[in-house]
Amino acid sequence: DFKPSSGGGMEAASSLRVIFVFGLWIVFKFRSKGMKETGQYNSSTKDHGRDSAADTNTARVLSVENKLAAKAFEEIKLEVEKNNIMLKTNMTWILSFLELSWFLLAAWMFSKNMAAWSVGVIWGIAQFRGGVLMHMAIHRAIFKSDTMNIWFGGFVVNIIIGISWRWWRRRHQAHHRETNILTADPDLKTYPMLVYNEQLPTSFITQFQTKLLPLYLVMYIPIWRISSVIRCIKQGWWYDISFTLLHWSFLLLIFTFSSYSFGQIYLILSLREAITGLTLGTIFMFGHFLEEVLPSSDHGLDPTLHVLKTTNNIESLNAYVNTFIVGFTGGLSLQIEHHLFPQCPVDKLSQLADITKTAVHRQGLDYHSTSFIGGLKDIWYRLEQIEDVALERHVVKTS
């Protein structure tokens, strides 16, 4: 068996530790400061009022769009029922259990004392796949039984990943109810390290967000862990706290009896969190990053129109590439269909996407989608635009 040396692991772990601590300092220092700044929320609405004639015309257009969206949804629903789109087959949960094999592979590599970096990479991929599973389970999209979905999701999230199931479930349900709503969608609260709409608050550090983006994504999962523990303590969710402690106690036990040094263990855990954050965080950005941000819950949009205006898909002109993207992301690439029918099994989402696109286009409404490369370019350009906005807002005055 290969037994790695401890020197390289210690040096890499030391560097990762410095980056992680610096990142947390940035988040908590600038977040509290920036939220107190005035005039940043919905500034475009405050600065650019409309006359009554324009308001009337806007309301008329919105009313027409709402009716068209409602018609489109009825057409989609009929096709869903006709084609049994929501029917969960045995293949759905079999594939879900196969995803757990990534964790078995990581455990086997760990037991064989393979190179610390390789264990961390595979464990990171496994945790990413676990994140896909917990998302499917929370929407009851794996098993026919709701109870099985809840138990399976709780096991994956609480025990294997080590994050509160209840915290994440409530957070994600809020995202579905209030998608891209300025003050209500928790997924918009990526400030100060990531701001992608000028209606959101910025800080001095937002001017450098393209440079800080990799750091933010690397810290994505640790920030989730800290947030979930804080929320559980405040709410008195000791059941979830106990499972989180069980997760870390088990890791402490196997690390204690392993032959890896402290530095190598730190490297393994850091790579695990970094790879999960980089993959999940990047995929999440495609769904709503470039779409419309609504000022409040009183937006007057039909539920279907709300989804169409605030949600985007990742698509390819090549059918085989599309199949790979849907499988790799666990259906997260087809956010429009997922938001319209959250309980749709992943293996049926592509079929549902064809139905949805046809119905939406028939009503003359926009259906937002982008390629993976094109989406990355658009996201990067948007980040640069907001950097310019932040530069104007936080210009340093010199005497």
Image (cartoon, helix red, strand yellow):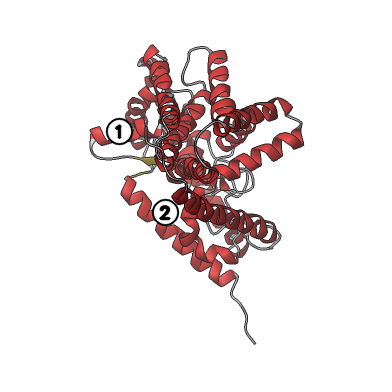
Please state, as top left, top right, bottom left or bottom right, where the C terminus lies in the image.
bottom right
Residue 380 x/y as whole percent: 41, 57
**Foreground mark, 2 or 1?**
1
Residue at 29% in and 31% down: 323
Residue at 33% in and 25% down: 351
Pointer 2 residue: 379
Residue 240 x/y as whole percent: 67, 28
Report whether residue 309 is seen: no
Residue 192 x/y as whole percent: 59, 57
Graded by Cα atoms within 10 Å as few (under 14), some (14 to 19) or many (20 or more), the crowding at tag 1 reads few
Residue 146 x/y as whole percent: 55, 15
> Could you tell me which secondary element the residue under label 2 belongs to?
helix
Alpha carbon distance from label 2 to label 1: 22 Å
Pointer 1 residue: 324
Q: Amino acid at mark 2?
A: Ile
Please give the label number shown on residue 98.
none
Residue at 61% in and 77% down: 396
Front one among 244 and 348: 244
Front one among 348 and 250: 250
Which badge, 2 or 1, is on the more N-terminal residue?
Answer: 1
Front one among 23 and 309: 23
> Could you tell me which secondary element the residue under label 1 belongs to?
helix
Snapshot quadrant of residue 225 = top right
Report whether residue 391 is seen: yes
Position of 171 relative to 10 (above/below):
above
Front one among 225 and 378: 225
